[in-house]
Structure formats: structure tokens, C-alpha cells
Image (tube, grey):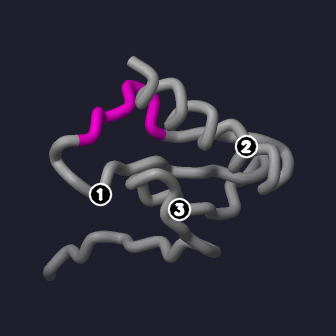
Amino acid sequence: MRSHPIQTAADFRFIYRGYDLEVTRAPSGWRVGVYPRTADLPILRRNEVYACDPDGAIVEAKGRVDGALRL
């Protein structure tokens, strides 16, 4: 028996300032995964954001990207 990795498709994704933002439905609301697209961008310590609505999660994720790029 072979095991296969479980893949979850993002409900939608987009690019913000060089980072992929992947928005998915979570059990308690919405989750946004934040991943750098190139090696020269900083990796976020906390790369997942949770919120009750997708707009709130996206705003929080964009704020984390902005904060990382300010350093």
C-alpha cells in the first residue's frame, strides 16, 4: 500500500509584494498561507493567518508581509 500526500486546493490565491497568499477555508473561519516566491525574500516566522472572514485574514497577511519587508 502506498501513501500519497494529501493536497488541499486553495480556494483562491494571489501574489502580494512577491509572496504567494493562499486562501483556504478552515474549520473555524479562513486561513491564509504566506509563502515567499523567491529566495531573496524573508521567510515569515508565522506564515499562516486565521480569521473569521476571508477579507480579515487577507488584511492580516498583507500586514505581516509589509512588516517583514520593512526590516
**Residue 24 percent location from the top left of the image:** 63, 63
Along the polypeptide, which appears first: circle 1 or circle 2?
Answer: 1
Percent position of residue 64, x then y = 55, 31
State yes or no: residue 68 in magenta.
no
Q: Which residue is mark 1?
A: 37
Q: Amino acid at mark 1?
A: Arg
Q: How far across and down, in percent of the image, does residue 12 sit?
A: 61, 74
Of label 3 and label 2, which has the lower sequence position? 3
Q: Which residue is mark 2?
A: 59
Q: CA distance from mark 3 to mark 2?
A: 13 Å
Label 1 to label 2: alpha-carbon separation: 19 Å
**In front: mark 3 or mark 2?**
2
Going from N to C along the chain, the mark reached first, 1 or 3, is 3
Q: Which residues are magenta?
A: 41-47
Tell me whether the residue at label 1 lies in contact with that at label 2, contact meaning CB atoms closer than 8 angstroms: no
Q: Is residue 56 shown above or below 10?
A: above
Placement of the C terminus among the 4 image quadrants: top left
Quarter-of-image position of residue 43: top left
- Give the numbered dot on residue 5: none
Residue at the location (78% across, 56% down)? 54
Q: Name the quarter where the N terminus is drawn.
A: bottom left
Residue position marked by numbered label 3 in the rendering: 22
* SS at badge 1: loop
| Horizontal side of residue 17 vs 58, given as left or right | left
Dot 3, crowdedness within 10 Å: few (<14), some or many (≥20)?
A: many
Q: Which amino acid type corresponds to the residue marked 2 in the rendered image? A: Val
Q: Secondary structure at mark 2?
A: helix
